[in-house]
Image (tube, rainbow, N blue to C red):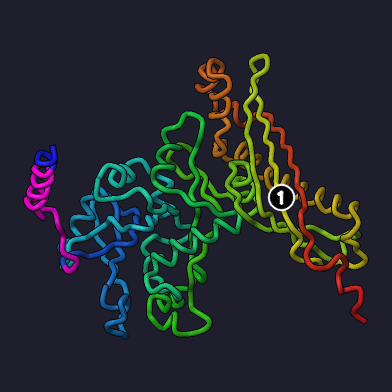
Amino acid sequence: MKRLTAICIMIVFLLSLTTGCGSRRELNELAIVPAIAIDKQQGGYLVSLQVVDPGEVSSQKSGAAPVTLYKEKGETVLAALRRVSVKNPRRAYVSHLQMLVISEKVASQGLGKILDAFFRTPDFRSDFLIVVTKGIEAQQLLQITTPVDKIPAGNMFKSLISSEKIWSPLTTVTIDTLISDLVSEGKDPILTGITVTHKTEKKKLEAANKLTNIQQIRRDSIFKYVGLAVFKKDKLVGWLNEEESSGYNYVVDNVFQTGETIMCSKKKGRMAVVITKSHAKIKGIVKNGHPKIQIQIRAKGRLSEVNCNDIDLTNSRTISLIEAQTEQEIKSHVKAAVQTAQKKYQSDIFGFGNSIQGTHPKAWNTMKKDWEKRFAHLPVDIDVHVAIQRTGKFGKSFIDDIK
C-alpha cells in the first residue's frame, strides 16, 4: 500500500513537469488597458483605450504622462479594438479593465449591441464598472489628468466605489447587473452619470489634458459623478437629479451610509443627520386584479451637526421630532424618484414588476404585456421609520453660550 502511494505521488510529480506555458504572456509584451470609452461615429463607433505606461507608474522615470490614449473607428466595438493594434506596439490586455465609459449619444441609441462584445469575449472580466457621460464625449473624459492616483481610470474607479458607501445618490453597476436588468421583464436599468467641470470651456478642457492640471492647487478641470441615468430597455431616456437618485437607492436597498439635512424649529438653522444603516423591502400586492406596491424603509442614524438655538437633545420628545423630520426627508426623496420614473419616463427602474412577478406570478403574466402603462399609474405606499441612536458628545449645543 505504501509503495502504491509512493508511485502515485511520483506520477503526479512527473505530470506536473510536463505542463507547458503556451498561453503565457510576458508583461513587456502587453499594453494594460484600465479604461475604454465608446463614442458614436458615422457608420459605427469610436473606441478609445487608456493604456498604462508601466515605467511612469512605477516611478522609474518622470516627466511623462502615466497613460496614453489610443483611438480607432470601427463598424463594431471589437473591430475598432483590433484596429488599435496597428497604432499600439503591444497587444491590448483588457483583463484589468476597471471602467467602461459610454457616451450619452451611444446610450440613447441602445446599449445592447455594444455590450455583447464585453460580455461574450472571455478576455473581459465581469467586475469592471460602467458609467454614462453627461454633456461630454466619452473620449474627453479619458483625457483628463487626475491627482492622487496616477492612473485616471483607477481614480474614477476608486472614487465611485468609495463614494457609493457614504453618499446615497451614487451606485456602482457591473456588466452582470446591467445585463440582468436588460433581460428582465420587470426591471429597467440605471447607470451612474459622469461629467467634467468646465465642460463648455474648450481652453480649460485642453489644459486638463496636460500634467500641469495636477501640478496646481486649483485644477483646470476634474471629473465628477452626476446623478443616475434612466433607461427604458437598453436606451437612455433621461436623468434623475441628486434628490431623485438618493430616493432610488433608498428604494432598492442600496444605501450604506449618507447624510440628511433637516430644519431646526422655527426654521432657524439646520441639523445634519448621518444615516448609518438602512434596509428597504418592496412588496408587490394584487387585489381584484389591480397591482399595488408597498415600500418599507427602516433606517438608523446619528446627529453629526447641530446649528440650532434653544434645543435640548436630552429630551426624548426632541429626538422624536428629529426622527420624524428625517423620515419626511427620506420619504420626499423616494416620492420624487417614484413620480419622475412613473410620470416622466415610464421606466420601472425599481423592479416593481419583479416584485409583482415574485408574489403573484399568474397575475403578472397578464400584466406584463402592458406593464409600462400600468407602472405609470401604479399606487405606491411609502413607509419610513428612522431611529436616532446617538446625538454626539453634548446634549445641548454650545451655540447658545456664544455671547
Residue range of the region highlighted in magenta in the rendering: 6-28
Residue at screen point 23% across, 55% down: 81
Number of numbered callouts drawn: 1
Left or right: residue 4 compared with residue 230? left
- The residue lying toward the viewer, choosing from 202 and 283, is 283
Image side of residue 242 versus residue 47, left or right: right
Residue at the outermost front position: 2
- Residue on which the image places disc 1: 300
Q: Visible in this render: residue 87?
A: no
Q: In the shown orientation, is residue 94 left or right of residue 241?
A: left
Q: Is residue 258 magenta?
A: no
Magenta portion: prevailing SS class: helix
Quarter assignment of residue 287? top right
Where is 99 relative to 7, above or below?
below
Residue type for callout 1? Lys
Q: Position of residue 141 (x, y in %)?
A: 41, 65
Locate residue 115 relative to residue 365 in the image: left or right: left
